[in-house]
């Protein structure tokens, strides 16, 4: 049975906002958030909050950051979101405290049931717990939980949950070694 | 013998359009196609067709899509081209019906003869047959044919042809399992 | 001991230019360098030089190229920097003669000491020697030297130095075969 994308039906999926608000966000993001012409983190945080994102204190958001739906994003305190990070949150993405998402990283929440001729949409959230580090150009797949202080190396692809205080690398990412913290 | 890029000669290579048309396309694409400020798929399809792309019915093209030369692009019916997909078609790229190219995927058609001091350009087209799914941030290398209903997993790199109804993942992508379709 | 990004201190790190110059560069880059709307390599070279980059003759810089700090960039003669190449140079990046950095490649110079609760910044330069080819969407990690005429395949991640006249591929990149040059 071949795929028939004309029979695709995602009418059950709700973004949580009207088409008008989504277009307004797209325009706002394009001009002031995803843009590269200004470095003002505070403005990005402000606009994301205005569109419903829950963002803690001391959060730094760099130029080029793209967020699909701010109202589905939660960010804790003292977290960094680097240049050109793409949070493609069709559903909830929860980012904890003291998390570093390095430049060019990508969080993916959408999938399709490739066995179905209707190619049904499947969305699964992502959780990045406290102290997690997603390396530059890292990719986190749908439904993944990166447990406390886990690390995904630059350019790696997380296809399974990352265990606490473990470092992963490669495509798909495999455990490399433990993250042993020094005493302060 | 060292490489000497000052001796590079791609005068044999023809884009198929004048420098003026190419500049006009670059500007048009920058403002209305590759841009992120509007979500109107129809406008993107219209402009690509205006510059010579053959695009079927029911095709969806998302914001951020970059096409090198529209006049070298063929897209069938009911195909989806996701956000920030980059179709870098120095030569013909043929995309079939009911194909899904997910967000951030990259189709590469240019290569160089690295054995030559003149680093000669080599271009090879790409074919994505009906029902193919290129996962998010996937990369398809020059000359690759993705046969009917093959799947490239998110973040994977296709360096060889993909067999029909097979799922590939990794860098380089290796066959993972068969894509068994359910009866409708 | 958990990570505490509020205790992060990079006051020792100097960009080498005032905040005003950095903002001016960000704006200039956004409008005329990193932008996609014009193909004029000469303008990009000119602006990079104006902000302190040392760039040789016959250098080609394509649309979408992003350079963090031009004053920390050195490029030799007859080198190509492809579309959407991202030179994220927090410290010196030295690119030799006749180097090809293909489209979408990424040079990373920043790292963090993940064992420290203060997540200290660590910067390490990158050197691309003469005749090197970084393939499309390739990633070069901090501190890496790509020796003369080494090649990184498309989509690969260089985590160690690349030996002269050797071809590497994969994530992490492993030596594949020798680059045997033909006589001219």
Image (spheres, coloured by chain):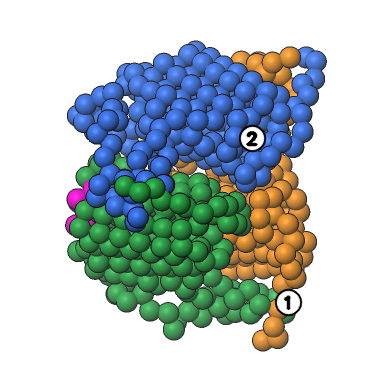
Chain colours: A green, B orange, C blue
Is C115 magenta? The answer is no
Nearer to me, B181 or C129: C129
Answer above or below: position of A89 versus C5: below
Q: Which chain carries label 2?
A: C
Q: Which mark is residue C21?
A: none
The residue positioned 33% from the left and 70% from the top of the image is A72
The residue positioned 62% from the left and 46% from the top of the image is C171
Residue C39 appears in view? no
The residue positioned 61% from the left and 15% from the top of the image is B6
**The C terminus of chain C is located in which quarter?**
top right
Query: For the stretch drawn in magenta, what is the main secondary structure?
Result: helix
Nearer to me, A120 or B76: A120
Rendered location of residue A68, percent (x, y): 37, 63
Q: What element carries label 1?
A: loop
The stretch in magenta equals: A41-47
Give the labeled residue for mark 2. C152
Q: Which mark is residue B180?
A: 1
Answer yes or no: are tags 1 and 2 on the same subunit: no
At label 1, counting other C-alpha atoms closer than 10 Å, the crowd grade (few under 14, some 14-19, many 20 or more) is few
Relative horizontal placement of residue C33, taking residue B82 as reference (left or right) = left
Quadrant of res A1: bottom right
Answer above or below: position of A48 versus C79: below
User: How far, Cα to Cα, is label 1 from label 2?
Assistant: 35 Å
Is A43 magenta? The answer is yes
Rendered location of residue B119, percent (x, y): 69, 24
The residue positioned 30% from the left and 60% from the top of the image is A97
Relative horizontal placement of residue C129, taking residue C15 as reference (left or right) = right
Q: What element carries label 2?
A: strand
């Amino acid at each position: 049975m071949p795929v028939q994308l004309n029979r695709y039906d995602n009418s059950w999926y709700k973004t949580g906002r009207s088409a008008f608000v989504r277009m307004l966000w797209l325009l706002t993001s394009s001009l002031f958030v995803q843009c590269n012409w200004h470095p003002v983190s505070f403005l990005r945080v402000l606009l994301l909050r205005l569109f419903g994102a829950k963002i803690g204190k001391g959060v730094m958001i760099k130029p080029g950051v793209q967020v699909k739906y701010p109202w589905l994003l939660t960010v804790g305190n003292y977290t960094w979101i680097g240049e050109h990070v793409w949070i493609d949150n069709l559903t909830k993405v929860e980012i904890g405290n003291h998390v570093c998402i390095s430049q060019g990283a990508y969080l993916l929440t959408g999938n399709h049931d490739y066995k179905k001729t209707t190619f049904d949409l499947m969305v699964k959230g992502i959780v990045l717990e406290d102290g997690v580090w997603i390396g530059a150009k890292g990719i986190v797949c749908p439904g993944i939980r990166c447990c406390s202080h886990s690390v995904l190396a630059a350019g790696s692809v997380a296809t399974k949950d990352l265990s606490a205080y473990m470092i992963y690398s490669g495509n798909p990412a495999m455990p490399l070694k433990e993250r042993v913290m020094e005493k302060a």
